[in-house]
Image: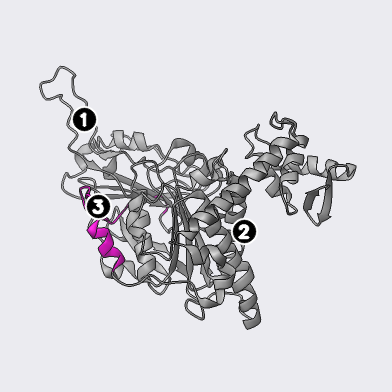
Amino acid sequence: MSITPAHRTPAAIPDDQVVELMVEVPPGQVLRYDLAALVSAFDIDDPGRIAVETDGSRRAIVTIYPSNPLTTMPPPSEADMLMDKLGRIVVGRYHNGRPARRRLFDPRTGSAQRALVFGTTGAGKSRTVQYLLACEKRNRIVSWYGDLKGGQSAPEAEGNVDWFATSQEEVILMLRAAVAIAQEARQPRYRAMGRNAFLIGDPDPLLSVRIDEANRLLEKGAPYREEGTYLVKELGRTGRSVGVGEELDAQASHLEELGGSDTLRAMLKEGEVTLLRWSSSMMRQLVADGLLPAGSQLMPIPKQLRPQILRSQFAADADDDDDFCDTQGTAYLLSGPHPTSMMRHFRIGSITPTPGLDPEILALYGPDEPEHLEKASLDAAGEAYAARGTAAMADLCAAVKEEQAKKAAVVQAASGGRGPQRTEDRIRAVLAASDDPMTADQVAAAVNADGGKEVSLGTVRLRLGKLAEAGEDVVRVGHGLYAAVR
């Protein structure tokens, strides 16, 4: 598709009307477009006035507005926050004014949801998370929330969720408990009932586990990257059919900073994905992973909604003016029906900063007690769940930290104090530090978390096979499981 002023001149676009153009290319061709060229062709000073949606093949709808339709957004209503018959809540509005919905549960399949929220600093991620937590509370969902910004991202959540964690150690305990609930409590009970899907409240509530600032737990060099990555994958693998969902909220950086792209690929393709303001590397990966059709383009989300006006530096009115509308909450719902259509989340909380807890956000949560875990899963949740919000949690976190220090000391000793260099040595060190047998995926994640050069999964599999055949340091202990010879 090529649109130039000769095809559609600026004079043909009324200043006070919405113009919609239906565009298609001949059969056998794929429609491609250049957003910058479209903005230039229609002589538009604000790129936010134009929206392009495609069917991924031959057709597109180009909509041009008199002004940016997402400049202002109202707060949500109570009706917006309640799930509809398809398990969806309304999170905001698309550029055309239609409701933007996100699924909390899929009643058609009985599946808890896996979700990802990406956004750069200042993109509105924390307010988006606050709204989702408030919606979960109002829908009687058990919310476990790990805020790895020390509790500063969403302080109003404390007391309004079932578990509020603020350290990496407590988040590890939270993830361990969630996996245990899924695998040791709910799976056996549901199997005995002959049930292969989840029904909310029959007999258990939906459980949602959310990690905010997940980069800090899963990035290279993070102390708990290996175990955190493993637990996130296990929860995603086994939690859906027993009503245990999970969400990662993270900076929009390289996916390798979240435990490796393999860890999240399934979540990206099957989960609820919200993309706030992003980085260019993130966009390339989303297209490469098949989440967006090849050739798709998303209009970049600027930091502020302001027309790009070019003025001479010598002009009398050339002084900087920062009085423009910010774009917090503007996003793309990549897993929704309109992945290339820009939307904006409802206005959440007070417009200006407050000296303490925000009363508007507290009002969203409501006065009721948050939903708690069912009694039948308390034993699986263990002492960490019982200790949440009490002084006893500090002792449990200290034990996790000590456990991790011992593992690191074993790895250091196995490498002669120099830090493992050869892939074989790094594999030996990882297996020596583990009390349990490990899969090749787990070994690869641990090797790549030791601060050395990145090693592919294929290389790790090859080296593991050779070491196991030699039988001196590594042995196969089951199908796909390896352990150190002790």
Q: Position of residue 11 (x, y in %)?
A: 19, 38
Q: Confirm whether the magenta stretch covers residue 367.
A: no
Residue type of the residue flagged with mark 1:
Ile
Q: Secondary structure at mark 1?
A: loop
Residue type of the residue flagged with mark 3:
Gly
Q: Quadrant of residue 422?
A: top right
Point out the stretch of residues depicted in magenta: 339-366
Q: Earlier in the sequence, mark 1 or mark 2?
A: 2
> What kind of secondary structure does the magenta stretch mostly adopt?
loop
Instruction: Give the number of marks.
Output: 3
Q: Secondary structure at mark 3?
A: loop
Vertical order, 404 against 314 (above or below) = below
Q: Position of residue 353 (x, y in %)?
A: 22, 47
Residue in the picture at 32% in, 50% down: 329
Q: Position of residue 421 (x, y in %)?
A: 72, 30
Residue type of the residue flagged with mark 2:
Glu
Task: Measure the alpha-carbon separation of dots 1 and 2.
Answer: 51 Å
Q: Quadrant of residue 424?
A: top right
Q: Which residue is mark 2?
A: 234
Q: Which residue is mark 1?
A: 309
Q: Secondary structure at mark 2?
A: helix
Q: Is residue 123 visible?
A: yes
Vertical order, 298 against 395 (above or below) = above
- Between 330 and 467, the one lying in front of the other is 467
Q: Earlier in the sequence, mark 3 or mark 2?
A: 2
Q: Residue furthest bottom?
A: 193
Q: Nearer the viewer, mark 3 or mark 2?
A: 3
Q: Which residue is mark 3?
A: 356
